[in-house]
Amino acid sequence: MASSNLQSPTSNHYAIIVAGGSGSRMQSAVPKQFLTLNGKPVLMHTVEAFFYSASAPKIILVLPADYQLYWKELCAEYNFTIGHQLITGGETRFHSVKNGLNAITEYNDTLVAVHDAVRPCPGEAVINESYKQASATGNAITAVKSRDSVRQLKNGTSVSLLRDEIYLVQTPQTFQIAQLKAAYNQPFTEAFTDDASVVEAAGFSVSIIEGSYRNIKITFPEDIAIAERLLVDGS
């Protein structure tokens, strides 16, 4: 899709935005990435957050085949003209990210951020720092410290964990492309819960950067109201 914007994407920056969720927990007839948030679909806010950042990545949007026509209709309805490449999702998030990654043929110093479509408030500072850290160390995994006490339940017994050592992982998760492609050449296992777990299983160390408590994931109906307030206040 061609963009009418004057902003030029940074040649060595990409963002793979993965939109494979359903509307089940939202009690919605459509997947949560298409729900209206401050006058337009959640997914459009997410794409805009990356496109208008100083990092200005080229955007790859991974969508289930069944919703691609619907997305194109929404783009026409909302006059959404930000350029992006549309890729068909896979059986799992792992396979969807891999499909998006296969669309990138550039190497050298290319950096790839992977982001959840239903996190519309990542914040520009987080996006830019993610690319900067990945360039320096190989990867950057956005996370925040737990604000709550944490307990682990095993075999019916719970044990307290040190809160200061617990991080709640978010996206974007950003990588040098050679590292990410090597990691995604592994066979899929159920242990792969995010991109960091895939990269770690391939033998790479993971670098955490500070995320934002404003970078919420739209999961339940009340999250829409929270995201609306965050967007009004400026994320």
Image: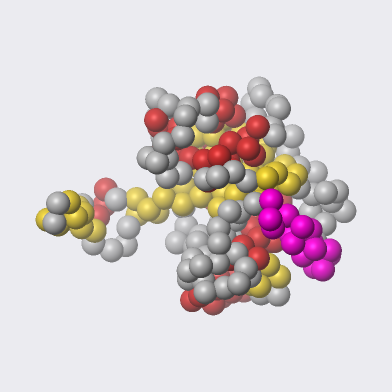
For residue 133, above or below residue 39 = above
Is 69 colored magenta in this rendering?
yes
- Residue 2 visible, this orientation: yes
Residue shown at the point (48%, 27%) measured from the top left: 186
**How would you classify the magenta stretch by its main secondary structure?**
helix
Is 57 colored magenta in this rendering?
no
Tell me residue 58's x, y (percent): 72, 42
Residue shown at the point (49%, 76%) measured from the top left: 222
Q: On the picture, is 20 further left or further right than 88?
A: left
In the image, 31 versus 204, the foreground residue is 31
Extent of the magenta region: 65-79
Q: Residue furthest top?
A: 108
Residue shown at the point (70%, 27%) measured from the top left: 106
Tell me residue 230's x, y (percent): 56, 70
In the image, 223 versus 69, the foreground residue is 69
Q: Residue furthest left?
A: 157
- Residue 17 visible, this orientation: no
Residue shown at the point (70%, 34%) measured from the top left: 103
